[in-house]
Structures are given as structure tokens and as C-alpha cells.
Image (cartoon, rainbow, N blue to C red):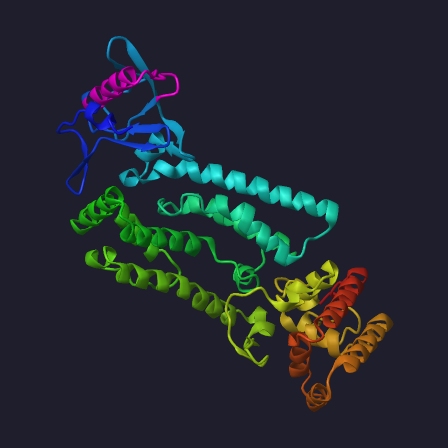
């Protein structure tokens, strides 16, 4: 195709990027011609037709389409060129895997809705794949969370992030469709209900919120452009920076809005910073590091997640000293799905204890235990104190016996020292990695018991 440029005429209606006229681009055997006028495009089509004739090829009119962007005074159904040649004028087309829409672009502000249909298509595809994974669970039972996260990154994430390196997320409704698929999948993997906290979906699995992940991919692409020898793409970047600096809408303007739309603060580079590696690297660092700080702040501010407050992860010596905002947590690695999900629901306040299930129906002091009816039915009360049901007493006796057998002498001493502080003792039991399966089994026993015993109706006042 080295001789193609000499057949494509240039004129004053050509698209220019940083002073460089761009008349055509090629991707394998796909050719894209562009012009800002009808006559300019007609001449370029006739030029490529002549090139095909010289090289003994046929011009496939049926597979070729014309897209008209911007607000036009007249509507074209057929684009005529040459001696009787015709090409269909489309409003939507799939080009190199991207769903492009001139209609959505015309309706959106500054024409930024060109990829609106692409979001819809990728959200639908990702949802179908997530549904297929859920269908596998109907045959195998709940999959391990680690397996679900690997399947997510291999099968679902590629669709949720498709084109994110060039498509700026400046349409909140379109992006929300993708985010809903991500959250629904993670909730399915963890066994949580649809209204569970969104923060724990990421702090407990190590996955990145989609908005920040897509934006980080886009910023990494800018770094790739700056470090690559591709002059045409660099010219497009410089043109976008220039237009933004002049106060006109461009790709960089959309990027600035996307960064400003993050739920945490990031410093957007000046025009010179966007064209140097150091400035873009600094922006990438703020976007990627800020998401963990933001999630940790949300977790610490949520009173219902008190069992996760102050949590630490093991350092190189095994001591719990490191604060890690995003990580696949140890309790999600419990093999038994019933045990794992029961403990997960306790730690994340997604359980069916009266203190939580009656949150919007009764004041705290009236969310009494279904077994003894004297104290508020909290995790601490059910796990450590309540003696209102024989099965609960037996399960607690077995649980403490199992803990005592596997605990070291030091751990036994620590547990005994906390006899007067049931809350601290409970936190120690819940956060130890050495006996997590035993704790999860106890959580499962309590969950099965409360499913059998409903909360009694409150007496008439």
C-alpha cells in the first residue's frame, strides 16, 4: 500500500492535526478516508477507486459506508461519487470493534457521544459473560473468590475496559452501565446482596473500581504515545492539547473533566505537563494511589464495618503491621463456600442478626435477641454471651474448644486477658488467620440456627 498516498488528493478541506494533513489511515485491510467537506470526500473515494484499478483490485461498495458527523442542513441516504457509484450513509457502524454513532454524537454536547452505543454493547456482552460464569456455579456450586476474580480479569474486564485507552468517560449514564456489571459480578462472587456496601467490593477482593481503572488505562496510553515513534498519534495529542489551551472542546478537555469527576482529588497537568513523560507519570501515580486512600477512608467512616477498622496485613516477618487498602482477604480463601460466605456476611454486616435486619424498623435498644429477648442481638452478644438456645450454647462450646486446641500458649494468654472485654476478644477471634476456618464454621452454625428461629414480633405498645 506504499503507493496509495499518491492517489489520495489533498485539499483545503483536509483534517489537520498539529499542522499535519490527514487524509487516510489504514488498519490491516480496513481503510478510513476523511474530509471536512462532501466534495473533498468524493475526490478521495474516487482516488482510492483509481488505486484499486491500478493494483487489480475491486472496490467493495456494499461493505463501504459513509458517516457524517456534526449538524448537517440536509439528510443524505446515499453518497454518490464517480460515474454512478453509490455508498450508503449510516448513522451507526462498527469499525475495528468500536460502535460509532453519528446520531448520538449529534445529540450530545460537543459531539462527545460518538461512542455512546459502544458502552451499551460492551455492557451487554460483559453481563452475558458474567451470567455464563454464574451458570457454571449452578453446576459446581459457588466458585472460590480467587477463581472468580481470575475469571473476571480474563473474561469480563476486557469488555468493561475495551477502548478505555482512547475513549474518555465523559458520559455518566453510559459509564454507570459498565459499573453496574462490575459490582453485580463481585457481589455474586462474594455472596452479598444487591444493596451491600460498594466499598468492600474492592477493599476485600483487590479489584479496582472501574472508573479509576479505565482512566488509568487511558493515562498509560498517553505515556505510550509520548514514548513511541508514532508521529501521527503524537500530532493528534498535541492538537488536542492546543485546542484545550485555547478554551475549545477537545479530547484533552474531556480527559480533564474525567479526572475532575473522580471521587478523590488529582492534580491535572498543565499543557506542557501533558506532553512530557514526567507530568503524565505524576498524574497516573495520583489516580492509582488515590483510589486506595479513598476506599480506606470510606471504610473507616462506615460504622457498620467496625470489625474491619484498624485492620492490618502481615509484613515480611508475619507480624500484622501493614495497612493494605485493596487485597484479596484471607477469609475469602476459606474452601467451604457456606463457611466462607457466612463469615463474610458477619464481617461486612450483611448478616441477618436483629441489629442489622431491623435497622430501619426499630430503634437500636429494641432490636432484641430472638433467643433470650433481653439484650440487643449483636454479633458480640450471639457469639460470646447468649445462652437462650441449647444449640447456640453447644456450638459455642465446640467453637471455643476447637480454638483452644489450635491456639498457641501466647494466644491463649491473650484471649484470657481479654475475658473482661468481649468486644476485643471477638475481634481477636475474627481477625486471626490461624483459625479462620474454625471461626467461619461457627459463623455458619449461627447463620443456620437463626434461619430456623424467626425474630418474634414486637409486643404492642
Quarter holding residue 25: top left
In this view, 43 is above or below 429: above
Residue at screen point 26% across, 49% down:
252
Residue 75 is situated, as x and y percent measured from the top left of the image, at 28, 20
Q: Is residue 392 visible?
A: yes
In this view, 460 is above or below 425: above
- Is 333 situated left or right of 382 in this image? left
Q: Is residue 192 visible?
A: no
In this view, 366 is above or below 179: below
Residue 31 is situated, as x and y percent measured from the top left of the image, at 32, 28
Residue 291 is situated, as x and y percent measured from the top left of the image, at 43, 63
- Is 86 situated left or right of 443 in this image? left
Residue at screen point 56% across, 42% down:
127
Nearest the viewer among 264 and 9 is 9
- Is 191 situated left or right of 260 in this image? right
Residue 61 inside the magenta-drawn segment:
yes
Residue 441 is situated, as x and y percent measured from the top left of the image, at 76, 68
Residue at screen point 34% across, 15% down:
58
Q: Which residues are magenta?
A: 40-64
Quadrant of the drawing holding the C terminus: bottom right
Amino acid at each position: 500500500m506504499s503507493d496509495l498516498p499518491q492517489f489520495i488528493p489533498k485539499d483545503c478541506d483536509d483534517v489537520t492535526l498539529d499542522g499535519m494533513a490527514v487524509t487516510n489511515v489504514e488498519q490491516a485491510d480496513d481503510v478510513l478516508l476523511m474530509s471536512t467537506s462532501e466534495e473533498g470526500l468524493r475526490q478521495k473515494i474516487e482516488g482510492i477507486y483509481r488505486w484499486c484499478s491500478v493494483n487489480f483490485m475491486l472496490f467493495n461498495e456494499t461493505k463501504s459506508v459513509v458517516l457524517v458527523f456534526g449538524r448537517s442542513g440536509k439528510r443524505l441516504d446515499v453518497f454518490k461519487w464517480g460515474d454512478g457509484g453509490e455508498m450508503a450513509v449510516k448513522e451507526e457502524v462498527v469499525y475495528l470493534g468500536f460502535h460509532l454513532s453519528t446520531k448520538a454524537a449529534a445529540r450530545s454536547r460537543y459531539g462527545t457521544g460518538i461512542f455512546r452505543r459502544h458502552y451499551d454493547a460492551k455492557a451487554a456482552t460483559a453481563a452475558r459473560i458474567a451470567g455464563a460464569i454464574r451458570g457454571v456455579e449452578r453446576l459446581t456450586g459457588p466458585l472460590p473468590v480467587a477463581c472468580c476474580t481470575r475469571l473476571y480479569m480474563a473474561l469480563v474486564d476486557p469488555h468493561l475496559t475495551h477502548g478505555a485507552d482512547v475513549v474518555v468517560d465523559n458520559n455518566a449514564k453510559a459509564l454507570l452501565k459498565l459499573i453496574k456489571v462490575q459490582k453485580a459480578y463481585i457481589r455474586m462472587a462474594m455472596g452479598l446482596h444487591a444493596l451491600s456496601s460498594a466499598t468492600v467490593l474492592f477493599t476485600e477482593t483487590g479489584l479496582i473500581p472501574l472508573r479509576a481503572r479505565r482512566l488509568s488505562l487511558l493515562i498509560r496510553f498517553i505515556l505510550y504515545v509520548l514514548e513511541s515513534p508514532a508521529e501521527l498519534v503524537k500530532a493528534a495529542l498535541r492538537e488536542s492539547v492546543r485546542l484545550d489551551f485555547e478554551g475549545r472542546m477537545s479530547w484533552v478537555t474531556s480527559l480533564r473533566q474525567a479526572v475532575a469527576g473522580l471521587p478523590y482529588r488529582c492534580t491535572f497537568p498543565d499543557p506542557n505537563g501533558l506532553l512530557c513523560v514526567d507530568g503524565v507519570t505524576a498524574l497516573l501515580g495520583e489516580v492509582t494511589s488515590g483510589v486506595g486512600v479513598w476506599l480506606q477512608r470510606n471504610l473507616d467512616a462506615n460504622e457498620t464495618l467496625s470489625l474491619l477498622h484498624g485492620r492490618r496485613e502481615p509484613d515480611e516477618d508475619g507480624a500484622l503491621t501493614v495497612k493494605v487498602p485493596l487485597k484479596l482477604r484471607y477469609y475469602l480463601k476459606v474452601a467451604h463456600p457456606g463457611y466462607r460466605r457466612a463469615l463474610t456476611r458477619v464481617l461486612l454486616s450483611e448478616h441477618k442478626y436483629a441489629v442489622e435486619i431491623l435497622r430501619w424498623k426499630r430503634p437500636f435498644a429494641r432490636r432484641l435477641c430472638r433467643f433470650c429477648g433481653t439484650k440487643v442481638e449483636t454479633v458480640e452478644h450471639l457469639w460470646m454471651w447468649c445462652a437462650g438456645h441449647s444449640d447456640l450454647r453447644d456450638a459455642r462450646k465446640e467453637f471455643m474448644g476447637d480454638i483452644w486446641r489450635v491456639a498457641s500458649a501466647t494466644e491463649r494468654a491473650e484471649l484470657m486477658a481479654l475475658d473482661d472485654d468481649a468486644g476485643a476478644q471477638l475481634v481477636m477471634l475474627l481477625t486471626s488467620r490461624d483459625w479462620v476456618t474454625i471461626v467461619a464454621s461457627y459463623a455458619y452454625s449461627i447463620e443456620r440456627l437463626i434461619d430456623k428461629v424467626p425474630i418474634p414480633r414486637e409486643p404492642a405498645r
